[in-house]
Image (cartoon, helix red, strand yellow):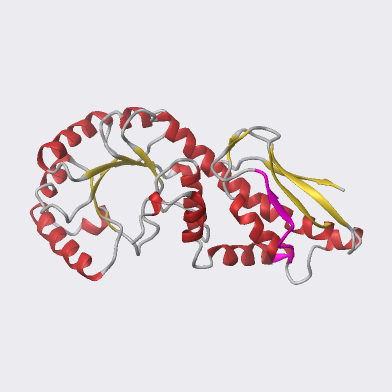
Amino acid sequence: MIDLNTLELPDLFASLTAGGEVDRLLEAAFAEDVGDIGDITSQSILPADRSGTAVVASRQSGVIAGLAIVPAICRRFGHDDGCRLLMRDGERCQPGSELAILTMPLRDLLTLERTMLNIVGRLSGIATLTRHYVDAIAGTKAVICDTRKTTPGMRTLEKYATRCGGGTLHRIGLFDALLYKDNHLAHLAADELAHALQDAITTARARYAMRFAEVEVDSLEQLAAILPIAPGLIDIVLLDNMPADVLRQAVAMRDAHAPQVLLEASGGINLQTVRSIAESGVDRISVGAITHSAPCLDVGLDIRV
């Protein structure tokens, strides 16, 4: 299975969207915007043969993501050559930075405008917030990871946006990695945990291709119970809602008993706490906020007739 985190952004976008995610998103987005009739405002005032040029520009500082989708939007209106990108996903922008130039009939420009801005603004907001977290832990060994707390129908694009902001992809869904969380393990007694996990992971590894196997713990006692599991079964242990001083103890336990296992901190992490968590020595920090709470970056479109 390809390690998506090793891909350059253009290759990552191609890999993540190979299943038709962009086409499905645009189909749904334009269906809710134009219905069965179309853009009645533009049709009522603009001649069908009147063309123009529009500049897509940022109104704020941030990190751009989603420009890779703009050519597909133009193609949807039959304008394969109607888009010229001026920046690349992952680049920092300033207020007034011009991102793309679109040339086509004005009716089409105004019909696609809002859907395009919604997508680019949403993804750029995620990339920008991700970059804030990445910058906050600079100089530590930890990386910022995304989660499955994404907008339905936009999972792969929002995860692409986290990479644009310098983040690291976690699992894409329930199909490509094992992650045993507290609800998966609630039926097990403490003395059953290690044996049950060893059997489950061994069986799953023989049956499925997967990116990694991860187990969540919420106490040092649980961590101590699973660290002796045979090397090569558990790749990552998720340390849930642990303060920095407890995380440091967990790191010391890992270093002593299973140095091959990565430790991931998660739960209630914000920009005020992420630095101290990274300095505890964990390898990964998963932050749901970078997708579920990112404000959109203000991006606009201006017609130049």
Is 19 placed above or below 296 here?
below
**Location of residue 2 (image quadrant):** bottom left
Q: Mostly what secondary structure, the magenta segment?
A: loop
**Does residue 171 appear anywhere in the picture?**
yes
Residue under the point 13% across and 46% down: 227
Is 164 placed above or below 21 here?
above
In depth, the one of 62 and 38 nearer the eye is 62
Q: Which residues are magenta?
A: 76-86
Residue 77 is inside the magenta segment: yes
Is 248 placed above or below 203 here?
above
Residue under the point 39% across and 50% down: 6
Residue under the point 50% across and 65% down: 18
Image location (x, y in percent) of residue 97: 68, 36
Relative to 75, 91 lies left or right:
left
Image location (x, y in percent) of residue 293: 50, 43
Q: Quadrant of the N terminus?
A: bottom left
Residue 164 is inside the magenta segment: no
Relative to 277, 39 lies left or right:
right
Image location (x, y in percent) of residue 275: 36, 28
